[in-house]
Amino acid sequence: MSLIGRLIVIFLAFLAACFVGGMIVVVALLFPEFADLGAGPVDQGAIDILLGFGFIFVSGFALVPAAVIVAITEALYIRSALAYAVGGGVVGLACYLGLVPFHSDTFQFEGIVRRHLEIMTGAGIVSGVVYWLIAGRNAGAWRERPPPRKPPPPLPSNSRPDVR
């Protein structure tokens, strides 16, 4: 596969992983609202808007950390699903911690909500697996040379015209 084709596959896999991650974040954050038995039917247009914003949120914050993970796995030919799941979890963790205030005097994050940290990390793990399913299984394949072609079989002896 050529490099340009590989970049297209990586881009599409990143978009799919971000969409799945955004869905997980939106559904997990809205789950307490859905659990209320007194709630009426949910407006489908509102859900579509929330899923769009979830996709934009996840893709915007995950672009740089995910690009680092993709570059490492492509350069080192890492094709393990576990590596992509761990990498996705690290990206989800980095995205969440990027939003939490950090005090350099005490070297501590302040205001961490454990449930939100778990949601973002879990969404990152699932997104990493989705990325692996689409593009990660063939990491580094664009650098492999195609196998040499076999020579054609010899012609049968009676197919050659007699040269006199």
Image: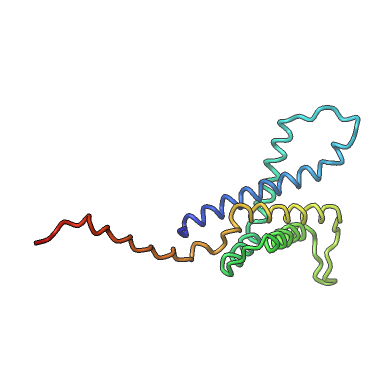
> x, y percentage for residue 45?
71, 31
Q: Residue at x 52, y 56 (%)?
A: 7
Specify the color scheme. Answer: rainbow
Residue 82 relative to residue 67: left or right:
right
> x, y percentage for residue 65?
66, 61
Outermost residue on the top side: it is: 40
Q: Nearer the viewer, residue 44 or 139?
A: 139
Q: Nearer the viewer, residue 156 or 19?
A: 156
Q: How many marks?
A: 0
Outermost residue on the left side: it is: 164
Residue 34 relative to residue 92: left or right:
right
Figure check: 100 above or below 43: below
Find residue 93 and report its image quarter.
bottom right
Find residue 48 and report its image quarter.
top right
> x, y percentage for residue 86?
72, 62
Residue 101 relative to residue 6: left or right:
right
Q: Residue at x 79, y 59 (%)?
A: 100
Q: Residue at x 69, y 43 (%)?
A: 53
Q: Quadrant of the C terminus?
A: bottom left
Q: Nearer the viewer, residue 155 or 149?
A: 155
